[in-house]
Amino acid sequence: MVFIAIDSFGQVLPDSINKKLDGLSPTEQAIQLSKLSWLNREKDTDLAILLGEEAIKIGEQFRMVEDLGEFYNFVGVALIHYKHNIKESIPYFQKGLEYGLRANITTTIGYSYNNLGDAYYLTGNVPLALEYAELSMNIFQELNEPRGIAYSFINLGLVQRLNKNYNLSIQYFTEAVKIREKLDDKRGIASATLEIGLTYFDMGNYDSSKVYFQRSYELHSEIDNKMYIAYSLTGIGRIFLIEGNYEEALKLFTNAEKLNIERSHPFGTIDNKLGKAIVYSSTNNREMGEIEMDSALKIATEFELPTKILDVYKTYARFYMNMNDFQAASQSFTTFINTYDSLYSKQQFETLAEVQHRFLITQKLDSINQNLLLEENKSKTLFIVLILILLIALVIYWRFHTNRKLNIELTKLNESKDKLFSIIAHDLRSPFNVLLGSIDLLRREDISPAEKDESIQNVYNLTKNTYHLLENLLYLSAFRTGKIDYSPTHINLNLMIEDVLVSFSRQIELKKIQIELVLKNSSFVADEAMLEIIMRNIVSNAIKFCKIGGVIRIESRKDFAFNYILIEDNGIGIDDSIKNKLFTDEQIKSNRGTEGEKGTGLGLSLCKEFIERHDGSIFVESGLGTGTKVTIKLPINIK
């Protein structure tokens, strides 16, 4: 099967991409498209966005809630860092956060916060940038996710630099470098080194700044990261400008500008043009300086970069001060103030919009949770419980049936499946019969209120016990497939035996069986679910083979090293030929009970496995017509 994806502009995906999607299901295609989007974000950003949009489209169609958060974040990163479109990136990060919260995927939530912090830092919205940086840091520290922690340190450092908390800013960047050195993240180390250089520059510590700019240049040259090579050259050029080496500064700004234009990087291009303009003001070249500043303003306005627009007007004022044109400088400074006020007001609306978006996400999540709660309440009704039991049993059977392979390990798994379903049939049939009988009784018109109340109570108790039994069987399934280990704990044997007998109360009543309990030791250490399955199988067998009006005796005692459980009936007993095969893997034909009850013939074999997991043992004493006595022996100090 080939799923050809077309974006909203009618562009067909390249053949090379379609070949990679061939034979995949739609959801697998979406995941593959998202991975390819991330890989292409730098070398072919337009393709990366196209692939990401297609992944989102498929993900929304097939409700891939757990994956959509990552899909949206990938497209947002391509837009903000490689197309430099901050405004369009924010809704993608917001959707990524929404799906992260819906699916409760903490990593996705952390990176969504981090990306929103990036976006609001670039718009100059310091409060929102700081809030999201702190939120992402809290999550990544809780997850102990070093890469995410490093990203958060970078964002916190950027915000603190804007707030002129330079020492704290350098501390954050230095911590990011340490983490990235452990991760051998050369790109991350180089970018954090550049940020330290920029922070020292803003502090006025030009000697330290120059050292870090030079180091950043060397590191980025090793990995051929042209965008950051340009950043480093711009930083060194600013140092030369301050030192009065205008010729060298102009050369570095020009070289950096070429790299930024090649990479279609408006931020860097604006910085280079403004640097060149100041060089021209220092060499009394007004015409060239104004050309550079006007060009920088055009780019900043076109890409809607508020912080860069402010940088341009600030440079206008500085330029005209250097040219001794104080009137033009005053006008430029006034324009800067007015623009700053306008952008500050815009930030207020931006913050308000973000608060409103969070409120909408909260409402949506509340609505989802309410729907889930309603579904949960519905599932408590009798017929839903019965349907769930049947569906889960079918799922277990289908899972084992379709995953058989021709090798030794999976052959064993298949045998385990057969045994498991024998237990299901063995332990669930009787409760179902009682449930159906009680329901038939409730449907009768002549039933008295007392009988009705009693039947409802019986249905409730038996449904609860049957559901509890199902949980034990699912636990057994997980144990047999190696997904969980057994967990010994302190248990009350008396309460367990009472629960087991309650689940078989109808059969006991119908066969008029007397139960004798001699429980001298009620405190056991064992895996509770496994021991309960053992008890259910053995008690079920005792009831099955006990005669009408017979007696079943259950005893518990201990000596200095072992706990003992004995279950004895005065039923029809077991033939020697069958008794010798009880604890083997050989399939045996189970005799019908005294009232025609049918069993699996595998219950005791499984009991033996669980008992041996406890380093215990099981014995059966029986003969035809003499009844049966089963003894379970478990160490007191179970490991």
Image (cartoon, rainbow, N blue to C red):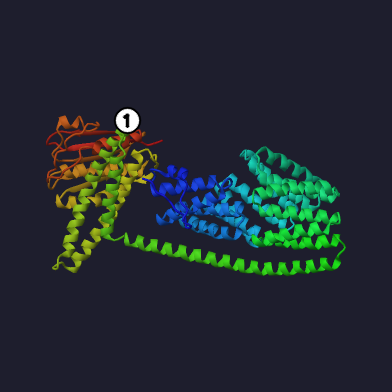
Q: Quadrant of residue 426?
A: top left
Foreground pick, 299 / 440: 299
* Above/below status of 478 relative to 303: above
Q: Quadrant of residue 286?
A: bottom right
Residue 481's spot in the image, x, y percent?
A: 35, 38
The residue located at (51%, 56%) in the rendering is 96
Residue ID at (25%, 52%): 502
Q: Residue furthest right?
A: 324
Q: What residue is shown at x 33% (from left), y 36% (from top)?
A: 634
Quick check: 631 above or below 342?
above
Q: Is residue 142 left or right of residue 592?
A: right
Q: Quadrant of the C terminus?
A: top left
Q: Neighbour class for label 1 at 10 Å: few (<14), some, many (≥20)?
A: few
Depth check: give the residue in front, 31 or 412. 31
Residue 495 image offset from top left, x and y in percent: 31, 49
Q: Nearer the viewer, residue 515 or 476?
A: 476
As drawn, which residue projects farthest toward the front?
287
The amino acid marked with disc number 1 is Asn
Q: Quadrant of the N terminus?
A: top left
Q: Nearer the viewer, residue 539 or 592?
A: 592
Q: Tell me the residue that label 1 is attached to.
A: 407
Q: Is residue 113 visible?
A: yes
Q: Is residue 195 visible?
A: no
Give x and y (percent) for residue 50: 50, 52
Q: Position of residue 599 (x, y in %)?
A: 18, 42
Quadrant of res 532: top left
Q: Secondary structure at mark 1?
A: loop
Q: Please, is residue 495 above or below residue 376 in the view?
A: above
**Side (left or right) of 144 relative to 552:** right
Q: Decide if residue 345 is on the left or right side of residue 474.
A: right
